[in-house]
Image (cartoon, rainbow, N blue to C red):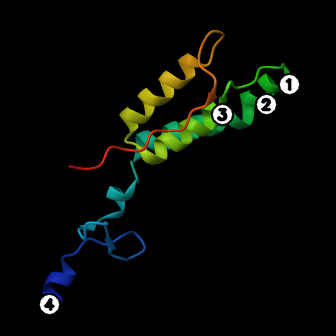
Amino acid sequence: MSPLSASKMPVSPQGETETSPSGEVQTARQFGERGLATTAARTAILAYRYSFSPFLHLCGVRCRHEPTCSAYALEAYAKHPPVRATALTAKRVLNCRPGGTWGYDPVPEPAAAR
């Protein structure tokens, strides 16, 4: 690799070049940093988890799923783009009701890139 081509390669915020499994060089943004929308959603989920959720727990309200809905949402935002993560989270929360689903319900893996 020539010094010229190495200088044009994207680098992560830590200054390291990262490579995908297929060998393509990728920036940190392509590895899961989704920006403001994801940060805002994750902040709201964590605020719910540490403020309102304990109150519900004291009142006897429990999540019907494993992992909990807030853990599911955080994992969905870590694995998927914001729009897809929001859709998965909304579907999960709407099923957390009497007559809805219950039990183990993991976040689906992202579809493979084509």
Q: Compared to 99, does 64 lie above or below?
A: below
Horizontally, residue 39 falls left or right of residue 15, namely right
Give the residue pinned by disc 4.
2
Q: CA distance from mark 1 to mark 3?
A: 16 Å
Give the residue pinned by disc 3.
68
Give the residue pinned by disc 2.
54
Q: Are the residues flagged by discs 4 and 1 in contact, CB closer than 8 Å?
A: no
Q: Does label 2 or label 4 sit earlier along the sequence?
A: 4
Q: Residue at x 45, y 39 (%)?
A: 108
Dot 4: within a 10 Å radius of its alpha carbon, few (fewer than 14), some, or many (20 or more) residues?
few
What amino acid is found at the position of numbered circle 2 in the picture?
Answer: Pro
Give the residue pinned by disc 1.
58
Q: CA distance from mark 1 to mark 2?
A: 6 Å
Residue 113, position in %: x, y? 25, 50
Quadrant of the rendered image containing residue 58? top right
Residue 19, position in %: x, y? 31, 71
